[in-house]
Image (tube, rainbow, N blue to C red):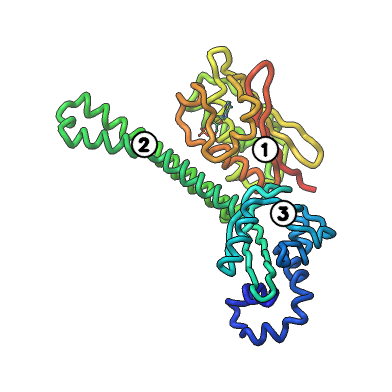
Amino acid sequence: MLSKVLRLFTKDKKIESTEVDQSLSLTTKELPQILDKTGIGLIVLDSNDCITQINSVASLDLNIPKDYEGSKLVEVFNNGEIISLIKSAKVDTSAEEEIFGVEPGNKSFLVNATFDSDSSETTLVFIDITRIKKLENIRKDFIANLSHELRTPVAVIRANSESLVDGALDDKEIAQKFSNAILKNSEKLSYLLEDILNLSTIESGEYNLELAENGVSDIFKTSINSVLTNNPDVEIINNISSDIKVICDIKALSQVIDNIVENAVKYGITEGSNEIIINMKDQGSKVRFEIEDHGQGIPADQRERVFERFFRIQNNNTSLKEGTGLGLSIVKNLVNLMGGSAGNEKAYPEGTIFWFTLNKKN
Ligand code: ADP
């Protein structure tokens, strides 16, 4: 039986079956251990579906103690998909299936079952595909979110241009209205594309970081000044001391500060409060920076989620404002790249404190 498993793993490697058979006496003993080293699980069942061999990976991944050798598989690992896979292999010689949600660890496996009609043995090979499946889901979610975000501006641009082409151009007032809608939505598209390009550069590891010890006071001042130019009624109290230095990339740090301060203005300014406070806390080996607003705040169960790609809180405070839901995801990635961490917490009496840490030079 194990010769079949060996063939399964050597079939692409131009090893003749005679070579496989010659090396079999050695491999039969060693194969479970070899598979252990490669992280592949192996279970061999006799004609009554009792376990005759199980390697350490399968034993750990499926929570089957090794001394269960001899027990019926269903008694120690009662998984309906595996049972029907074994049945299929007995009919078709081999069968393959992806199984999900295997405890402990909620893992996913690609399972191959091979039946040897001479010995009536069934061999099960388990390949852990948890990470691949997770990445696949992230990719699917990303495409779904992206299409959703692109659909509205593209539809608005199209509908308004069609109306202009169909005669709205002749009415100056209506033409102005439609052209404004086209402008606004094409701006939205370009922000979205800019954020996506940014994020993909960061996530693919291609962001060119120049980490060095830099003073941060000027970076905060530049960001604050640009926010104040567009929002003259906002009051920003800046408590960053001029001599503080941390390990950072100037461009990345500016992007982080711009994003958080712009969010504080966008979501944190209310009729009752136009104040944003920027603080720093020297924590020994690192410095914690805090941007505090007294707006509506973030519900406790969504504090972490705001850092997810495309996540926007479902309330009027957000839906009335333009945004891509990508800014904080970029923030977290950049801060992590610079060796720090980022988060948020409730401000008092209400509002949000967004914080991030950066390391000081040793
Ligand atoms: P965007 O601002 O483009 O929507 P972000 O990733 O920057 O995307 O922010 C994600 C969401 O987090 C926002 O849509 C908003 O709902 C929420 N948020 C961000 N900053 C604040 C804040 N200071 N106060 C309240 N909610 C905020």
| Vertical comparison of 338 with 124: above or below | above
Residue corresponding to mark 1 = 342
Label pair 3/2, CB-CB below 8 angstroms: no
* Residue drawn at the location 53% of the way across and 47% of the way down: 199
Q: What element carries label 2?
A: helix
Residue corresponding to mark 3 = 74
Outermost residue, right side? 67
Q: Is residue 155 left or right of residue 71?
A: left
- Residue 247, given in percent of the width and then of the height, sits at 70, 46
Q: What element carries label 1?
A: strand
Quadrant of the rendered image containing residue 14: bottom right
- Residue 63, given in percent of the width and then of the height, sits at 77, 52
Q: How crowded is mark 1: few (under 14 residues within 10 Å), some or many (20 or more)?
A: many
Residue 153 disc label: 2
Q: Measure how far apart labels 1 and 3 are at the Cα level.
A: 46 Å
The amino acid beneath tag 3 is Val
Residue 31 disc label: none
Q: What element carries label 3?
A: helix
- Residue 189, given in percent of the width and then of the height, sits at 40, 40
The amino acid beneath tag 1 is Ala
Q: Is residue 276 visible?
A: no
